[in-house]
Image (cartoon, rainbow, N blue to C red):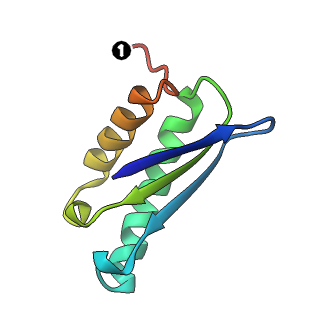
């Protein structure tokens, strides 16, 4: 997964999810987007600043569980300096 940090936002944080056709059929792509949205709901309260983000899923993530997606998102948000979860 790749995180593109577009800009700081004046309003609330906005997030987009991009899952390309190389990932698989529409069912797989939508399942990944649902997992990413669920992960964002858990992590969005811990973000320090309102930002505009785009998460781009890669083909290796088809088998990942929700917890694994959340860990990947947490890693990317920490690396970008956006997440403050106390660890």
Residue 52 versus residue 79 in the image, above or below: below
Question: Could you tell whether 76 is left or right of 37 in the image?
Answer: left
User: Closer to the camera, 81 or 68?
Assistant: 81
Residue 73 occupies which quadrant of the picture?
top left
User: Closer to the camera, 64 or 52?
Assistant: 52
Dot 1: few (<14), some (14–19), or many (≥20) neighbours within 10 Å? Answer: few
Question: Could you tell whether 27 is left or right of 47 in the image?
Answer: left
List x then y, in percent, for residue 37: 50, 55
Question: Which residue extends farthest top?
Answer: 86
Q: Secondary structure at mark 1?
A: loop
What residue would you read off at disc 1?
87
Task: Count the numbered circles shown.
Answer: 1
List x then y, in percent, for residue 46: 54, 27
Give the residue at x 25% y 55%: 65
Residue 67 versus residue 58 in the image, above or below: above
Residue 22 versus residue 5 in the image, above or below: below
Residue 28 occupies which quadrant of the picture?
bottom left
Question: Which residue extends farthest right?
Answer: 10
User: Closer to the camera, 10 or 66?
Assistant: 10
Which quadrant is the C terminus positioned in? Answer: top left
Question: Could you tell whether 67 is left or right of 18 in the image?
Answer: left
List x then y, in percent, for residue 61: 24, 60
Give the residue at x 38% y 75%: 29
List x then y, in percent, for residue 83: 49, 26
Give the residue at x 44% y 33%: 77
């Amino acid at each position: 997964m790749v995180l593109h940090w577009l800009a700081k936002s004046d309003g609330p944080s906005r997030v987009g999810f991009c899952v390309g056709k190389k990932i698989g059929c529409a069912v797989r792509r939508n399942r990944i987007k649902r997992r990413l949205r669920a992960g964002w709901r858990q992590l969005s309260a811990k973000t320090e600043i309102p930002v505009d983000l785009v998460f781009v899923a890669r083909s290796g993530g088809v088998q990942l569980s929700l917890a694994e997606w959340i860990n990947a998102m947490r890693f990317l948000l920490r690396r970008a300096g956006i997440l403050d979860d106390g660890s």
